[in-house]
Amino acid sequence: MKKRLLFIAPDYYGFNEVIFSGIKKYTDFDSVMAISATNERYQYKNFYERAENFFSKTFLRKNLKNQKKREHLIRQMNQLDYYDYILVNRPDLLDQEMYDIVQKKGKKKIVVFWDSFSKIGGQKETIPYYDLAFSFDTDDCKNYNLKKISNFYFNEDLYSKNPIHDIVFLGTFDKRFDDLTKIINNMNQKDIDIKCFIYHPSDFSIDQQIEKNIVKLPNILPFNESYRVNEKGSVLLDLAHENQSGLSFRPFDALGSEKKLITTNKAIKNYDFYNSNNIFVIEDINNIEIPSYFFTTPYEKVDEQILEKYSFKNWINTILDL
C-alpha cells in the first residue's frame, strides 16, 4: 500500500526544491506535498494595510507582514490531510501552534538539522517532537543522541569534463574570507590559477593583489546550479565554518564529480572516501604547503559501494527509513 508524505522546509535558494524533487524521484509515495516554512507570499490588500505595516515596523517594532505570513501558513497547515510521514527542515522556524498541528497531521515525524545547534539557536528544543532526528554535525549527534547523516552529491552527470581553472571556490563573504585570502596569495605565488565566486548582499572591498581572483556574485547561486561554478575547476576548495564538526556539501560535490579537493576541514580524514591523492587537508592556514604533484597526478576513482553510500538516492532512503 502506497503512502503519503508532507515536506515542510524554508525556501532557501532552491534547496527545498532539490529535496522535494529527490523524494518524488527516489520513492514510491502515492502523494508528496511540500509547503514553505518561511517565504509564504503575502500581498497587501490595499494601501492602508501597507501603511499599517510600515507604522508597526517603524514605531512598534512589529512586522505585520510576517504575522500575516504566519497566519497564512497555519491556515494552510490546518487544511492538510493526514500523512504517513512528515519531514521537516529548520524546525526552529515553527512555533508551538504549528507543532500542535504537525502532531495531529502526521504519523511518523522526521527532522533533518542542516546546521549545527551552536550556529542556529532554537533547534535542540524541537527534538522531542520527532520520531527520527538527523544531523550532519558529529558533535550534535553525540551530545543529543541524533542519527548521523552526511550530506550527499547530485547533478554529477551534468559536470563538464573541460575545466578552465586549476581551483575554484564558491561561497559567501564571511569570516572565512581572511583564510581564503591567504590561500589565494599562496596559489598566486605558485602560478596556480584559482578563481573564487563570492556572494555578499552588498559590495565588499578586495585587496588589489587578489582582485583578479574574485568574481562577485550579485545573488546566491541556486542550490541546484552550484555545479555551474564547480565544473569550472579541476580542484574544488572547501573552507570549513567555525563551530562545524561535519562536512559541508563541497566535499560531496567533489566526490560525485570525481574532482580533487582542498579543504581546511580536518574531520574529512575520518571518512571512508578520504584519499590523500584526491584530498589535501590544510593543517595550518599560515603555512600552506600543497605539493605540486597533487595538481598533476590523476584522480583515483572511489569504490562504487562508497559512492552509492553518499548518493542523493541513498540519502533520501536513509532519512525516510525506507
Image: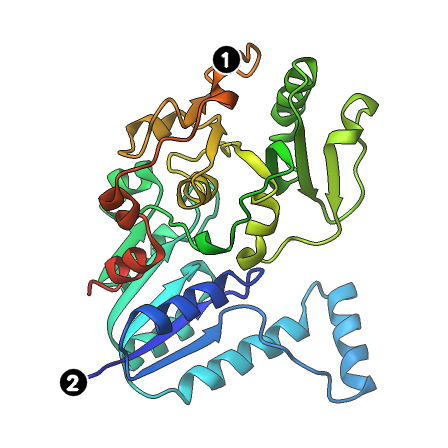
Amino acid type for the residue under numbered disc 1: Pro
Query: x, y (%) of residue 140?
Result: 32, 41
Q: Is residue 203 above or below residue 284?
A: below
User: What residue is pinned by disc 1?
Assistant: 291
Helix, strand or loop at label 1? It is loop
Residue at 26%, 44% (x, y): give it: 304
**Which residue is rendered at x = 44% and y = 47% of the image?**
115
Residue drawn where x is 71% and y is 45% of the image? 200
- Mark 1: give few (<14), some (14-19) or many (20+) Cα within 10 Å: few
Viewport quadrant of the N terminus = bottom left
Residue 128 spot, x, y in % from top left? 26, 59
At x 70% / y 83%, what residue is drawn?
43
Q: How many marks?
A: 2
**How far across and how far down the image is residue 284, in percent?**
50, 14
The quadrant of the picture occupied by the C terminus is bottom left
Q: Residues within 10 Å of mark 2 (few under 14, many from 20)?
A: few
Q: Are marks 2 and 1 in contact (CB under 8 Å)?
A: no
- On residue 108, the disc is none
Query: Considering only vertical position in the picture, is 267 above or below 122?
Result: above
Closer mark to the observer between disc 2 and disc 1: 1
**Residue in front for this viewpoint, 139 or 28:** 28
Q: Residue furthest left?
A: 1
* Frontmost residue, 181 versus 120: 181
Of residues 11 and 220, which is closer to you in this image?
Answer: 220
Residue type beneath disc 2 = Met
- Classify residue 20 by image quadrant: bottom left
Distance from the alpha carbon under mark 2 to that under mark 1:
56 Å
Above or below for 107 versus 194: below
Name the element at disc 2: loop
Q: Which residue is mark 2?
A: 1
Q: Position of residue 79 (x, y in %)?
A: 41, 90
